[in-house]
Image (cartoon, rainbow, N blue to C red):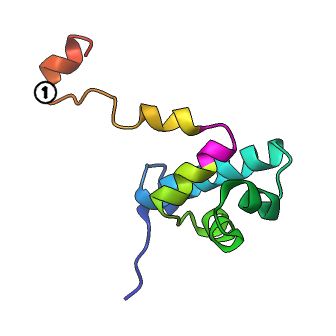
Amino acid sequence: MNKFDIGEFVPTLTEKTTLNNLAARFRLRRKEMKFSQVKLAQCSGVTYSSIRRFEQTGEISLHSLVKLANAIGCLADFEELFKHEIITSVKDYKNGR
């Protein structure tokens, strides 16, 4: 059975598009910092093959992603995860929460 990602057909956020976008932003930042994948592997302690797979597929362990983020100066970005308040009703949304 073939699985498809709805994000390929309509502009919506899916797990796959999130992974692909994250990998693309990482690759861009790595290149901006003039790191090759090999050099970044040496600096971060993450294997070259893991970096390569991440940039191609978006797949990586959380531990390795944190190590890479630290190596490129983006560790603080993780502090923003799960901070947004959850809106559970329209009333909360209207009150500016």
**Height in image: 3 above or below 12?**
below
Which one is in front, 11 or 70? 70
The answer to whether residue 17 is left or right of residue 39 is left
Residue 20 screen position, x and y as percent: 57, 58
Q: In the picture, residue 1 is in which quadrant?
A: bottom left
Q: Residue at x 21, y 14 (%)?
A: 94
Q: Residue at x 61, y 64 (%)?
A: 54
Q: How crowded is mark 1: few (under 14 residues within 10 Å), some or many (20 or more)?
A: few
Q: Is residue 10 left or right of residue 30?
A: left
Residue found at x 49% / y 49%: 11
Using the image, determine if residue 51 lies above or below residue 17. below
What residue appears at the point 72 percent right and 62 percent down from the top-left corner?
A: 41
Q: Give the range drawn in magenta.
A: 69-74
Residue 40 visible at all: yes
The verdict on residue 35 being magenta is no
Q: Does the magenta stretch include residue 73?
A: yes
In percent of width and height, residue 97 lies at 25, 16
Residue 83 vs residue 56: left or right?
Answer: left
| Circle 1: element type | loop
Report if residue 9 is visible in the image: no
Q: Where is residue 80 drawn, in percent x and y?
A: 43, 32
Amino acid carrying mark 1 in the image? Ser
In the displayed orientation, state which residue is furthest to the right.
34
Q: Which residue has dot 1 on it?
A: 89
Percent coordinates x, y for residue 13 in the rendering: 43, 49
The number of numbered discs placed on residues in the rendered structure image is 1
